Image: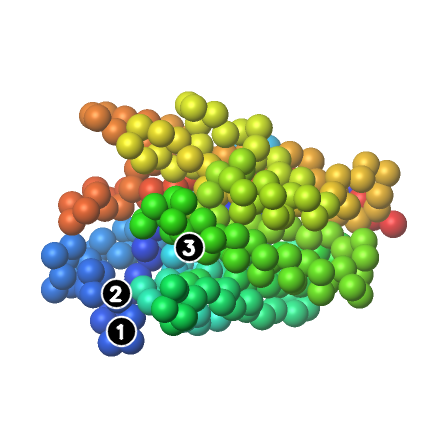
Amino acid sequence: MKRHNIAFYNLENLFDLHDDPYTLDDDFTPKSEKRWNRKRYEKKLKKLGSVIAKIGSDELGEPPAVVGIAEVENKTVIRDLIGSKHLRKLGYRYVHFDAPDERGIDTALLYRDAHFEVLESKTLAVMIHNPEGERDYTRDILYVKGLLDGAPVHLMVNHWPSRRAGAELTEYKRVKAAQTCLEMVHEVRASEPEADLVIMGDFNDNPDSASIKENLVPESFYNPMEKLHTRKRGSSKYRDSWYLFDQILVSESLRTKDKFGLRFEQAEIFDPIYLREYSGRFKGNPFRTYVGKKHLGGFSDHFPVYASFTIHKF
């Protein structure tokens, strides 16, 4: 029997230093008010790499086999990340596609090639339109089919539309993202009725939100994150309230205890003290890279989450 962790981490604006004329990345250039420069970029890469290498390692003694990531600008920053000090010897590879998000941020999948083999990958466009009928461009959903130490699994990495204009006003966008996930679930199950699926990401909604509770979960999914969200704990914090937008859902097929292959065990928020603000008004919050224009030099405004699995051979 083997054990592995699958993790998800929103990296909070991992941009390179170059101005892309086709995206809204102007804040993250050396001449911007944020003064995003080589030193700050490399410091962030090193910090993020140190976190990824430690996610769930207390239980398993090794880094996660698979990590979904969000808020990465392009392949360059992903390559720099897996080539950084704490990750370069761990054998991480990646799956990434450029998406049409206006800010130019994408999702991606990191995987250790000693444990995971990619069989298929593609993006799923979330087709949202504003009241005038114009398309509202957002992040694509990344779909990857692979083998985790020989056990087949279907993965989806998400970063759903934000609540910036108001949770209720934007809810329909996240419901549409959930429905896009379900279209892929149905496609997979049409050819593999007992397929094992993992849906992960920053959903910009809590476990009890309609987008998840009323759309994904009823389709034979289990959300282990629901019991982790409390008034005192989550993966991000806003105006003194904890939110658990970062979640990992598993198909009910992964909870069958007498099955062979991949089997879900438990899920957790990775929130050790060194990932938190250590003093002041925001003590205990995720230690982020920026607050507005002020550079704090932290990790991310989100904590990672992860789920543990065992593999039972035939």
| Crowding at mark 1 (Cα within 10 Å: few <14, some 14-19, many 20+) | some
Left or right of 115, for residue 8: left
Could you say which quadrant of the image residue 82 lies in? bottom left
Q: Nearer the viewer, residue 127 or 124?
A: 127
Determine which residue is flagged by label 2.
25
Q: Say which amino acid is labelled 3.
A: Pro
- For the residues labelled 3 and 2, say whether their Cβ atoms are less than 8 Å apart: no
- Name the residue rendered at 48%, 38% in the picture: 206
Quadrant housing the N terminus: top right
Q: CA distance from mark 3 to mark 2?
A: 18 Å
Q: Position of residue 113 (x, y in %)?
A: 61, 61
Q: Amino acid at mark 2?
A: Asp
Give the labeled residue for mark 3.
Answer: 161
Image height of 75 relative to 52, above or below = below
Q: Is residue 242 above or below residue 297?
A: above
- The disc placed on residue 206 is none
Asked if the residue at tag 2 contacts the one at tag 1, i.e. Cβ–Cβ closer than 8 Å, the answer is: yes
Residue type at mark 1 is: Asp
- Of the numbered discs 1 and 2, the one sitting upstream in the chain is 1
Q: Residues within 10 Å of mark 3 (few under 14, many from 20)?
A: many
